Amino acid sequence: MENILITGADGQLGSELRSLTQGRNDIRCFYTDFQDLDITDPAAVENFISANSVTRIINCAAYNDVDRAETDTDAAIRINVTGPMNLAQAASRHGIYLIHISTDFVFDGTRTTPYHESDRPSPLSEYGRTKLAGETAVRRSGCLAIIIRTSWLYSPMGKKNFVRTMLRLGEEEETIRAVYDQTGTPTYARDLAEAILHIIPQLDAVPRYGEVFHYSDEGSCTKAEWAQKIVDLKHLDCDVVPVPSSEFPSPTRRPAYSVLDKSLIRTVFGVKVPLWERSLSKAVRLF
């Protein structure tokens, strides 16, 4: 039986993993968040893995307040760099696989075609820089690991995400402003959780040491187009007004284009990637 440690289990992806794995008889999962396991403490990580005979780690923990990371950099480094490093070093000592979740924010968004895993990262923000440093820490540990970059994650289980915000504004306002100059792919966290669970049984076939894979839902849109789709699916009586990013002053530079190419994860693991519109239509009913 697999004993799987899931960190960040109270977040969007962690919650979807919990929903999909609870009650299964073939695996045992340990759902932890910061109050259960401080991944920035190497001794705590080592003790937890040893005490529970952990055989896999899925690291969903992240400091993902993009704007706050610009000033709260020490906390972002602890969670996005030190934490993954501790998990990876423990995974290396125990010879177990780590699946580490990263982000499209490692790219600068200057491309106009989907980013491949081999494209050179160039983050624009402290959040992106710390997430890239976390990837580097995982690879340098020499542990068995794969790194999955994703984008524009949302879930009905999330307390704060773009979909929830648009639904709230659509109920309260006659118009919603959403930016037209940021293009990416909304990703239903449940789709990513299903992809991870599909990959896990295949990990022992070929040793991988920090290999990077991209996963988001299929297709692309602007934030304004995403907002319009949300409004349409919920039949909300409001208008979506496309505006430039400059109308939302922010301390953080965000990539203007961050669509991810999913060819590699499809080819290597046979992962199915649903269209973002189809997944959104399923998810929106649950909000």
Image (tube, rainbow, N blue to C red):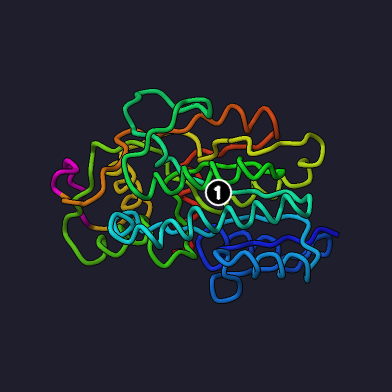
User: Is 211 drawn above or below residue 75 in the view shown?
Assistant: above
Q: In this view, does 80 lie to the left or right of 230?
A: right
Q: Which amino acid does label 1 sit on?
A: Ile
Name, please, the residue furthest toward the right.
1
Q: In this view, does 135 lie to the left or right of 126?
A: right
- Residue 214: quadrant of the picture: top right
- Tell me what residue is drawn at x 34 percent, y 46 percent: 229
Residue 128: x and y, percent?
Answer: 39, 45
Using the image as rendered, state which of residue 64 and residue 135 is in the foreground. Answer: 135
Residue 5: x and y, percent?
Answer: 69, 62
- Residue 28: quadrant of the picture: bottom right
User: Is 179 drawn above or below residue 30 in the view shown?
Assistant: above
- Tell me what residue is drawn at x 50 percent, y 27 percent: 116
Residue 72: x and y, percent?
Answer: 32, 61
Range shown magenta: 238-247
Position of the N terminus, as image quadrant, is bottom right
On whether residue 278 falls in the magenta region, the answer is no
User: Is 22 drawn above or below residue 250 in the view shown?
Assistant: below
On whether residue 245 falls in the magenta region, the answer is yes
Residue 171: x and y, percent?
Answer: 26, 65
Disc 1: CA contacts within 10 A as few (<14), some (14-19) or many (>=20): many
Position of the C terminus, as image quadrant, is bottom left
Q: Mark 1 points at which residue?
A: 101
Using the image as rendered, state which of residue 188 and residue 106 is in the foreground. Answer: 106
Using the image as rendered, state which of residue 32 and residue 184 is in the foreground. Answer: 32
- Tell me what residue is drawn at x 73 percent, y 47 percent: 200
